[in-house]
Image (spheres, helix red, strand yellow):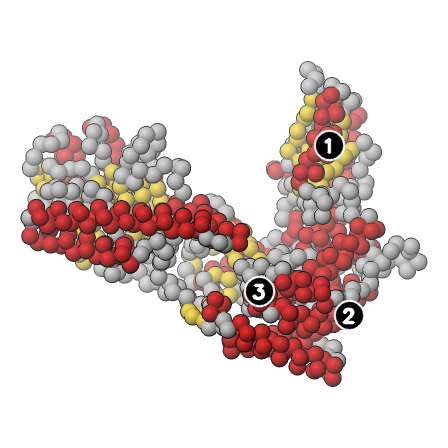
């Protein structure tokens, strides 16, 4: 039905939805809408929903527990809000339950007297003549019919549907307290045994059209020409580099970036995105049948003869059958398609299991913000709150006479760079520098010498291009109120080219640490040959041994608050230096952490930049390794007999408890960790720390443990 409408639909009221909790909103394929549902619990049938375009600010106002009704509030800048209600009255509903439905509607309307009110749904009341507010037949008790007539009268509601919506009866209603705002009401061909109702309102809500963006059509590239241009640039770059030994890394990167952008511009066709919703299984044949169905519906209404009715019903049945068959065929094609890793299939599955929430209008300091730029700035301020204040301590340099092995520099190999370029996942999102992975992988053989020269220069100079120190942050909704910025988490995108060099640095440092055995054996996170499973096996072995001996183990699950974001850069570099990283490589890591900026992107608009004051850079390859270095000394002052298990920032402290003295030692270790926490500008979250007591003893040793004075 929706595909046949010339004008876009902004609000969809649905009754008898037959939805259950097993059906995800995403499976309804209404990605442009916020979907508010009230499903029937315990038995099939029934249910109501209201779907509101995401460009409007809609808030769930009330979901009735005792009646099949749902209320949504739509805020309109500078005007009265609109309260919309979708309701369903089952034919066998008792008088008392009918009264509950009416009372629910009355209560919500009474609490929002100044609002525009729209009530829509299937009330199954064919006895009522809504035009004259009279009861004309007695299919249902007069008392039930009178309930709804009294409700409409008390609230000043008028019915706008004047044509039959099922057979010869008007079962579906659209009641409003302001008829002047309704331009037209039409009954059109539906998708069930009821026809659909289209209401056109005079209410105008100013909205911004989605910002179009340019996308490149890599499937239409002349690959031979693309590689030829890349090869020509590579030869010129090598000659230029031999003549001019540029010592400014930003100038070199600017040259590379400018030429790569020109190669894309000259060789890759592009188009602007279309905001029109497209369902790939709606075929030309399906559209034709829908058109014929609508045509015969109009003829049936005009002629009112059996032949037109049969013709309409035939086309309606064929359109529904073909649409279902086309959808099934589309999914089957995804299964059968020779697609590496079944990306398209799993993308489809994911889309059906996860709702695309988008970014709602935000509320901050009791003000509502609709503008994309304003929302982006609010998010950036929210995401920046987690940073710790930079440390002003001056740390002593490492002892020059120390016998600790050191790593001062890295030599970049052409084969290594080529392997990295060929291993790029072209489907990964483009970073702030707009250099796509598709170009880098397609022209790996032509460009790998360019990047080998550039990477080596960057490492030798100890400089990271400013472009690589910019992150674009995309807010992703978690749960709760969509209008609160704190209910979103940041997803960070950085330069793909920058991450290639990070891979080289990461691999070299990791190999160095394996040789020097610098990283604690307690740490199982982000390390080759170790995993969550290896950590679990080690821990369960200790617990099992204790239980076999009829012992007791007290374990404390420790939770850091925003650990990755609170890492102090100055202290981190001091720890990196003590780990044996010196010379140009230490300068490069210093440059990597300094002067970083983050922008939040909302609806294609960039926020103002905010400096990244602390934390390991999110969305980078080196971030996890740098965090392991930072947290590596956390267990240094623990008592013998106490164990700490680490998986990145997830920590588990435990000890076999044989006497009350062991409990006191475990508390002392907790105190020691709190000292480490303070010295390293970390922060435990006591409310999320948990105590687990493992024992098969009848009378275990009891002890109260605490963190920050809060009992666990």
Q: Percent from the top left, x then y, of residue 521?
A: 78, 42
In the depicted view, which residue is nearer to us: 391 or 140? 140
- On the image, numbered disc 1 is attached to which residue? 654
Q: Are marks 1 and 2 in contact (CB under 8 Å)?
A: no
Q: Does residue 416 sit above or below 326 in this rendering?
A: below
Question: Is residue 121 visible from the viewing direction of this image?
Answer: yes
Q: Is residue 107 left or right of residue 590?
A: left
Residue at x 72% of width, y 80% of height: 241
Mark pair 1, 3: CA separation: 46 Å
- On the image, numbered disc 3 is attached to which residue? 437
In the depicted view, which residue is nearer to us: 307 or 393? 307
- Mark 1 neighbour density, 10 Å: few (under 14) some (14–19) many (20 or more): many
Q: Earlier in the sequence, mark 2 or mark 3?
A: 3
Q: Earlier in the sequence, mark 1 or mark 3?
A: 3
Closer to viewer: mark 1 or mark 2 = 2
Secondary element under disc 1, as helix, strand or loop, is strand
Mark pair 1, 2: CA separation: 45 Å
**Residue 94 position by quadrant:** top left
Q: Percent from the top left, x then y, of residue 660?
A: 77, 23
**Residue 501 position by quadrant:** bottom right
Q: Is residue 694 left or right of residue 67?
A: right
Q: Is residue 253 left or right of residue 482?
A: right
- Mark 2 neighbour density, 10 Å: few (under 14) some (14–19) many (20 or more): some
Residue at x 39% of width, y 37% of height: 21
Residue at x 38% of width, y 51% of height: 330
Question: Is residue 363 visible from the viewing direction of this image?
Answer: no
- On the image, numbered disc 2 is attached to which residue? 460
Residue at x 50% of width, y 47% of height: 478
């Amino acid at each position: 039905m929706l595909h046949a409408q010339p004008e876009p639909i902004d609000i969809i009221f649905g009754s008898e939805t037959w939805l259950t909790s097993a059906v995800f909103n995403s499976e309804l394929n209404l990605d442009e809408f916020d979907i508010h549902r009230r499903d029937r619990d315990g038995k099939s049938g029934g249910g109501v929903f209201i779907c509101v375009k995401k460009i409007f600010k809609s808030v769930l106002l009330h979901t009735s527990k005792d009646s099949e009704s749902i209320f949504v509030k739509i805020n309109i800048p500078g005007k009265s809000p609109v309260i919309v209600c979708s309701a369903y009255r089952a034919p066998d509903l008792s008088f008392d339950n009918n009264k509950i439905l009416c009372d629910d509607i009355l209560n919500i309307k009474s609490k929002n007297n100044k609002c525009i009110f729209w009530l829509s749904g299937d009330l199954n009341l064919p006895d009522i003549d809504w035009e004259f507010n009279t009861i004309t037949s007695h299919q249902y008790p007069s008392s039930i019919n009178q309930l709804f007539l009294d409700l409409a009268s008390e609230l000043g509601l008028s019915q706008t549907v004047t044509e039959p919506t099922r057979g010869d009866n008007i079962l579906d209603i659209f009641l409003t307290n302001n008829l002047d705002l309704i331009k037209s009401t039409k009954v059109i061909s539906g998708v069930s045994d009821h026809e659909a109702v289209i209401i056109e309102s005079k209410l105008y809500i100013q909205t911004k059209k989605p910002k179009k963006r340019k996308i490149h059509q890599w499937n239409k590239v002349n690959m031979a020409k693309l590689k030829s241009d890349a090869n020509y640039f590579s030869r010129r770059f090598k000659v230029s580099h031999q003549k001019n030994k540029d010592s400014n890394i930003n100038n070199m990167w600017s040259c590379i970036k400018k030429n790569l952008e020109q190669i894309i511009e000259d060789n890759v066709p592009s188009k602007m995105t279309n905001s029109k919703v497209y369902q790939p299984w709606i075929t030309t044949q399906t559209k034709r049948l829908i058109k014929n169905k609508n045509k015969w519906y109009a003829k049936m209404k005009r002629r009112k003869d059996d032949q037109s009715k049969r013709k309409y019903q035939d086309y309606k049945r064929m359109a529904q059958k073909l649409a279902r068959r086309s959808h099934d065929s589309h999914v089957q094609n995804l299964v059968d398609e020779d697609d590496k890793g079944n990306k398209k299939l799993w993308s489809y599955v994911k889309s059906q299991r996860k709702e695309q929430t988008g970014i709602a209008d935000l509320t901050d300091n009791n003000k509502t913000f609709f503008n994309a730029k304003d929302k982006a700035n609010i998010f950036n301020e929210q995401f920046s709150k987690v940073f710790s204040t930079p440390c002003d301590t001056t740390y002593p340099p490492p002892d020059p006479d120390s016998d600790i092995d050191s790593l001062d520099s890295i030599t970049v190999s052409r084969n290594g760079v080529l392997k990295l370029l060929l291993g790029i996942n072209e489907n990964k999102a483009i970073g702030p520098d707009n250099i796509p992975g598709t170009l880098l992988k397609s022209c790996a053989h032509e460009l790998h010498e360019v990047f080998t020269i550039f990477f080596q220069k960057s490492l030798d100079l100890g400089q990271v291009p400013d472009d690589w120190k910019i992150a674009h942050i995309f807010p992703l909704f978690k749960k709760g109120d969509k209008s609160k910025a704190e209910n979103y988490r940041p997803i960070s995108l950085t330069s793909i080219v920058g991450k290639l060099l990070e891979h080289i640095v990461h691999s070299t440092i990791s190999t160095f640490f394996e040789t020097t055995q610098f990283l604690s054996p307690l740490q199982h996170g982000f390390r080759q040959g170790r995993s969550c499973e290896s950590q679990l096996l080690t821990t369960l072995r200790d617990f099992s041994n204790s239980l076999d001996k009829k012992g007791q183990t007290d374990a404390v699950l420790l939770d850091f608050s925003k650990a990755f974001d609170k890492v102090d850069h100055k202290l981190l570099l001091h720890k990196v230096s003590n780990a044996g990283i010196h010379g140009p490589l230490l300068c490069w890591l210093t440059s990597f952490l300094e002067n970083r900026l983050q922008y939040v992107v909302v609806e294609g608009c960039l926020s103002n930049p905010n400096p990244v004051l602390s934390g390991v850079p999110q969305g980078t390859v080196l971030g996890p390794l740098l965090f392991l270095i930072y947290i590596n000394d956390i267990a240094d002052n623990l008592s013998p007999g106490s164990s700490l298990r680490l998986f990145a920032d997830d920590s588990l402290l435990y000890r076999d408890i044989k006497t009350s003295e062991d409990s006191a030692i475990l508390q002392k270790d907790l105190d020691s960790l709190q000292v480490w926490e303070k010295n390293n500008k970390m922060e435990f979250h006591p409310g999320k720390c948990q105590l687990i007591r493992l024992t098969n003893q009848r009378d275990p040793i009891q002890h109260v443990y605490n963190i920050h004075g809060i009992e666990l």
